[in-house]
Amino acid sequence: MSLSDDTATRVDDGPVRKRRSLRSRRPAVLGAVLAVIAVAAVVLVVSAGGGDERPAVRAAGGGPVAGGTLTYALAGTQVSLDPAVAATAVTGLIDRNIFDSLVAQTGPDTFAPWLATKWTVSGDGKTYTFTLREGVTFHDGTPFTAEAVKASLDHVVDPATKSAYAASLIAPYEKSRVVSDHVVEVTLKRPFTPFLQALSVPYLGIQSPAALAKPVADYRPVGTGPFSYVSWEKDKRVTLRKNAGYASPPAGASHEGAAYLDTLVFEFVPEDATRWGALTSGQVQAIAGVPPVNAGKLRSLPGFALNSQETPGLNYNLYLNQTRGPLRDVRVRRALSAAVNVEELVRNIYFGHFPVARNPLSRTTASYDPTAESELASYDPDAARRLLDEAGWTKTDADGYRVKDGKTLTLVWPYWAEGNKEQRDVLAEGIQAQAKQVGIKIERPAVDTGAFVAKYLIGGGYDLVDVSFARPTPDVLRFAFASGNTYAKAGGNVALVDSPQIDRWVEEAAETSDPATADKDYAAVQREVLRQAYVLPLYTPVQLTAFSAKVRGVAFDAQTYPVFHGAWLGD
């Protein structure tokens, strides 16, 4: 799964249901995969994102054309319309087009104006004063003012909202004060240098106070963004339409006015083959999650373009619950790490499209420490067996699994099928098989979303959980390993790490204004979590996004979400 990433379960993959309209036509769709569609060539440009949104797909010639509908097929599905509640990547991707943010991230540590034209920070780092754009209106006609900023931030931290992620981004938030219609003062309980980055993400997009005042059952997403909400057909699609009066893009956007597209449709298509066939047969104009097995073919298929971007934040990692059963012993945790040939598995399953990870943090994220991998237990089955012997698991049963005090060395790794993507189930089978070679039994009980959340993530009845998490800041390490950031508290600490030392490092890094101090602290966290084997890094998620050559002008933000404000359809 992917926290944000990714539900009521905070996962970027969201619960997935089979979509009948495309699936019922699967034979024809798959047959179309072999078709070669001759369309004008496109030039692919990878964007750094944020306010510096360069086109990802650009026409060889000609200018933008207004009108038309772009349909984009996703592997996941929507679980909540409110970005302050859900934290799936699907929610972030869709809501990025509905909601503007106060600031835009333009680089690892740089930010540009958006709904805020400027801001100041007090000497103690606790008070941010934002001057806001004038003349901006929400989709429901409500004027954008300082009151909207206050209402949005208060909504995020309100316990009644039951935020699954957004509240953790601004944990030190204390209050907002309306200074005037277009000046708002935000006070934090302590200095918090990731605050601007947090404000740049769609989960903290500014919402209409009128929409937030409605009962939860009547909630609809109302922002100031280039597209407005039309409908949500659960497990099928979300439809957005152009905000004709849009005039508040971030600094560096491709243009100032309304979007070119009339309609933007996000189709939920969980099956890789069906999604791929829908693109190549022309049913959709773009897809996320291009199957790695097809990515190479797409590069040479006329009429299509492939965009490949490594995701910043936490890699796709396996987290080891160090509070439960055999994994309380660091030797058993390190034995599991040593038993798995991650490089071989990732290479064979993903055809070189996904980089092998040897650090919980993606190499595209600020403060990534390449030397930390020296603390990771290298693949060595013999060393794994020695560690298990040292830990007292010296006997084996008839099936070859280790036994101690009459109990088999068994680890529970729940399989949430609705959140599966990128052949992660196949990777898990490989890990399961290699663990068995040294005597570790891994059970994979299949669970639905309700059980996954209640019994496992909240109830703690697991030994292993697989998670990826997209966020372009090293503060994501605080989210994943600070003791107070458990799932029950809207955090991502699924290894249930409780280390005062790690807490000190991540808090100091979040409070300091000295980049060198922050780098040192974040590097220490990376080394420590690998040394203690709280996490087994697997691969860096790569956004493999495919477009028909008719699609022009798509950009990608700092989290690698596609942005459609400048998108248009050519011939």
Image (cartoon, rainbow, N blue to C red):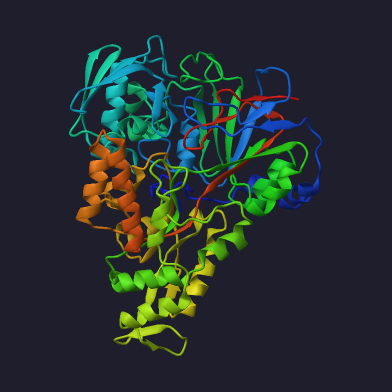
Q: Is residue 483 left or right of residue 568?
A: left
Question: Where residue 356 sits: x, y (%)?
Answer: 52, 56
Q: Residue sitting at 38 percent across and 55 percent down?
A: 372
Residue at position x 81%, y 42% from top?
36
Q: Residue at x 51, y 24 (%)?
A: 227
- The one nearer the camera, 75 or 485, is 485
Query: On screen, 529 above or below 507?
Result: below
284, above or below 143, in the image: below
For residue 454, say whether it is visible.
no
- Does any portion of residue 299 appear in the rendered image? yes
Q: Position of residue 537 (x, y in %)?
A: 44, 58
Q: Horizontally, is 154 left or right of 61 in the view?
A: left
**Which quadrant of the figure has residue 84?**
top left
Residue 350 place in picture, x, y as percent: 60, 57
Is 330 rendered above or below residue 557? below
User: Quarter-wise, where is residue 507 in the image?
Assistant: top left
Q: Relative to residue 135, is residue 571 depicted above or below?
A: below
Farthest top residue?
A: 135
Q: Residue at x 34, y 56 (%)?
A: 527
